[in-house]
Each structure stands twice: as structure tokens, then as C-alpha cells.
Image (cartoon, helix red, strand yellow):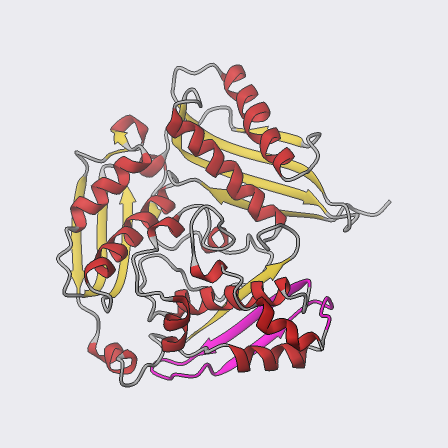
């Protein structure tokens, strides 16, 4: 008997300590861009018990109160008491900020228009879900997003902000995937009813999400496997900006160049090029040039054009990969300035991306999710 073909992706909620830091960094980025579209921002956040440290390099004409933004972000998530993980009103906040290196600025100014750093970026899309995302990561995001929505509404008794999910799908019959296991770890009040809590999670969250995706509900269930999850947030585990890069992208289905997104302005191709490659890949799949598409681009600091562009379609292409690569080069401007212009990235749109994934979102309007190049790409099918 052959082994099952299983694949797993995870997600985390807005209250996870790393995601808290991502949201603070992106909220600061948005505040800078709201007043100064040309702000240069590289903002990192660190959170631990009763302490948030905000550091990095920011050059902007905007007048931004970093501390106030951090406290507001924590309150919005629900971190209003020490016992929950951190107290937004009373925790210590340290701001250690410098300006951008002039050595970087000289290569990324409007006259030069080069990349803000060297690096490799990937974009991916597939026809496995309606938003062209892998099933495992899409479901993992929806589990914690929906659970958090119920918490905010007061409909999820005993739940606290810090949550994680994990979805394992059985692809043994590739044409008919089935959910094998769903795992959720959800922070809760100390005086909770464990049986009632777990029943609610299984029946009202796990099964509901599975049915929304048209999937089976006879999967294995794991809920808070240690039996208790009271201490969470930055008190339970240190948080840091940019530490959930696979959660932020494709759940491990596609490759990753290693660069994080949050807290970076769009001259940083770690972020903007990854968005552009997602945009291109999604339009390629939606145009039926391939069922799966992964793109890679690489950049050199201060240089406009990418040093390479690579296409992988895993044998699902409807036209040759050479044709697809030619279409990418002809129809899309992959210079940093071209990416910023195409996706209109000098706007305060980033905080919404800092929890529940940067790709495949339907709850917010993100320009790299638009399907406005499908008709243009369909002509390459001829």
C-alpha cells in the first residue's frame, strides 16, 4: 500500500506576536505614505513582555507619532490587558529610528530608479481555488480570520487574540483532494469550559470553513493539543516583524526568495516585485496559459531592469514556456518604477496585508489581485 500524498500549510491570526509586529510596522508605513508618497521606510518592530521596540530607517517629511500608532494597533487587535499578552495603554514603547542610508538612496532616486536592494522574488498562482491560491494556505487563513471575526463580534466565548491554524490536505487522488487534518491552537481565558470551547471550534469554525470550500468534514481534528493556551501574545512568545514569510505568501507551495514584506516602502523589491510577480502569475492562470504558474525575478541594487526572469508551469502550460516568458517581458514593466506605477503602490494600503496573507485576498482591494491583464494575455493562446 502506497503512502498518502499529504501537504500542509499554516496561518496565524492578527494577535500572533509576529503578526502584531507586522501590523505595527505596516501601520507606520501607511502613516508615512499618507502624508508623503515618496517616504522611504524600513520599519522593524520587536515585542515581548510589556515592551515594544520600534526601529529602522525612515526618511520622510511626514509627521508620524510612532508610539501612538503602535498603541492604537494593539488596541484594535484586542491587547488591552496584561493578562491577554500585552496592555496597549501601559506597556513600554521604545523608538530607535534613523534615516535611510544615502548610499541606498542614490541608487533608488527618481533619476536612477533602481532597486532598493539585490535579491530574488517569487510570485505564484494556481487554479485550485477561486482566488487562484493553493487550497491549504487559503483554508488556513480563513480559519483564523473567521475565528478572529467571531472573537471581535463577541460570538466566540473565552477566545483571546493569539491563534494559529494548520491544514493538511490529502492529494493522493489529485483530482479529488480531501482534508486530512485541521489543527487550531487558540488562546483562551483561564476560566473556560474546555469541552464547550473545543466543540464550538470544531462545529462552528472548522466544519463551517470546510463546507465553504466544498470540502469533506470527516477530517481529523486537533484543538490546543497541549490542553491549555492561556498565556499568549508577546508575553507568551517574542514577536518580530517579517518572521512569517511563508504564511504571508503561499504556505510553502511555491518557493520564496527570503525577503519579508511588512514595514518596507515599495522601492524595496522584496515587497513590490513579489506583488508584481503574483499579479502576473494570477493573470497568466486566469487567461488559461497555464493551470499553475511560478515566476522568479532577481534584482541588483541601484539597477533598473531585473537581472533575470524565470517561468515554471509544472507541465500545466497550454502554450510553451518560451511564449509565456515572452509575454511577461513584453506586457509587464518589471523595473522598480514600472512596478510602482502599474500597481500604484505609493499609497497607504499596507496595514491590511499584515495579517491573513498578502496574496489571494478578497476582503480588501489590493492592486496585485486585479485580473485586468487577462484579455491581453489571452492573445498568446493563438
Residue at 65% in and 56% down = 127
Give the extent of the magenta segment.
291-318
Q: Position of residue 50 (x, y in %)?
A: 23, 37
Write the residue at 38% across / 21% down. 189
> Up-down: is 242 above or below 255?
above
- Residue sticking out furthest to the right: 1
- Between residue 166 and residue 319, name the one nearer to us: 319
Q: Is residue 297 magenta?
A: yes
Quadrant location of the C terminus? bottom right
Q: Which is nearer the eye, 205 or 252?
A: 205
Please, is residue 276 above or below residue 142 in the view?
Answer: below
Picture coordinates of residue 158, whole percent (x, y) = 41, 21
Q: Position of residue 334 (x, y in %)?
A: 45, 77
Q: Is residue 321 left or right of residue 188?
A: right
Q: Position of residue 313 (x, y in %)?
A: 67, 69
Q: Nearer the viewer, residue 49 or 260?
A: 260
Amino acid at each position: 500500500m502506497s503512502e498518502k500524498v499529504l501537504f500542509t500549510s499554516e496561518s496565524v491570526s492578527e494577535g500572533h506576536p509576529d503578526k502584531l509586529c507586522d501590523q505595527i510596522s505596516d501601520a507606520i508605513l501607511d502613516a508615512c505614505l499618507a502624508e508623503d508618497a515618496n517616504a522611504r521606510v524600513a520599519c522593524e518592530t520587536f515585542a515581548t513582555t510589556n515592551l515594544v521596540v520600534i526601529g529602522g530607517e525612515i526618511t520622510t517629511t511626514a509627521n508620524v507619532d510612532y508610539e501612538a500608532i503602535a498603541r492604537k494597533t494593539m488596541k484594535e487587535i484586542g491587547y488591552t490587558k496584561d493578562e491577554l499578552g500585552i496592555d496597549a495603554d501601559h506597556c513600554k514603547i521604545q523608538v530607535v529610528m534613523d534615516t535611510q542610508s544615502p548610499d541606498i538612496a542614490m541608487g533608488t532616486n527618481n533619476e536612477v530608479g533602481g532597486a532598493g536592494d539585490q535579491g530574488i522574488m517569487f510570485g505564484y498562482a494556481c487554479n485550485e481555488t477561486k482566488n487562484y491560491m493553493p487550497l491549504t494556505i487559503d483554508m488556513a487563513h480563513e480559519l483564523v480570520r473567521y475565528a478572529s471575526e467571531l472573537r471581535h463580534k463577541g460570538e466566540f466565548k473565552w477566545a483571546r487574540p493569539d491563534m494559529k491554524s494548520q491544514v493538511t490536505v490529502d492529494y493522493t487522488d489529485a483530482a479529488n483532494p480531501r482534508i486530512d487534518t485541521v489543527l487550531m491552537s487558540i488562546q483562551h481565558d483561564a476560566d473556560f469550559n474546555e469541552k464547550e470551547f473545543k466543540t464550538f471550534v470544531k462545529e462552528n469554525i472548522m466544519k463551517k470553513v470546510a463546507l465553504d470550500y466544498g470540502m469533506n468534514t470527516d477530517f481529523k481534528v486537533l484543538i490546543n493539543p497541549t490542553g491549555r493556551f492561556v498565556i499568549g501574545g508577546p508575553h507568551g512568545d517574542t514577536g518580530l516583524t517579517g518572521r512569517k514569510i511563508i504564511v504571508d505568501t503561499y504556505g510553502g507551495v511555491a518557493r520564496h526568495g527570503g525577503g519579508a514584506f511588512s514595514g518596507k516602502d515599495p522601492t524595496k523589491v522584496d515587497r513590490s516585485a513579489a506583488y508584481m510577480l503574483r499579479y502576473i502569475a494570477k493573470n497568466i492562470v486566469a487567461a488559461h496559459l497555464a493551470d499553475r504558474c511560478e515566476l522568479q525575478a532577481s534584482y541588483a541594487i541601484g539597477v533598473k531592469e531585473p537581472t533575470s526572469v524565470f517561468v515554471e508551469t509544472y507541465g500545466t502550460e497550454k502554450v510553451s514556456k518560451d511564449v509565456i516568458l515572452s509575454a511577461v517581458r513584453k506586457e509587464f514593466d518589471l523595473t522598480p518604477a514600472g512596478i510602482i506605477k502599474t500597481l500604484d503602490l505609493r499609497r497607504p494600503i499596507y496595514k491590511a496585508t499584515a495579517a491573513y496573507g498578502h496574496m489571494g485576498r478578497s476582503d480588501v482591494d489590493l492592486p496585485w489581485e486585479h485580473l485586468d491583464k487577462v484579455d491581453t494575455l489571452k492573445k498568446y493562446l493563438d
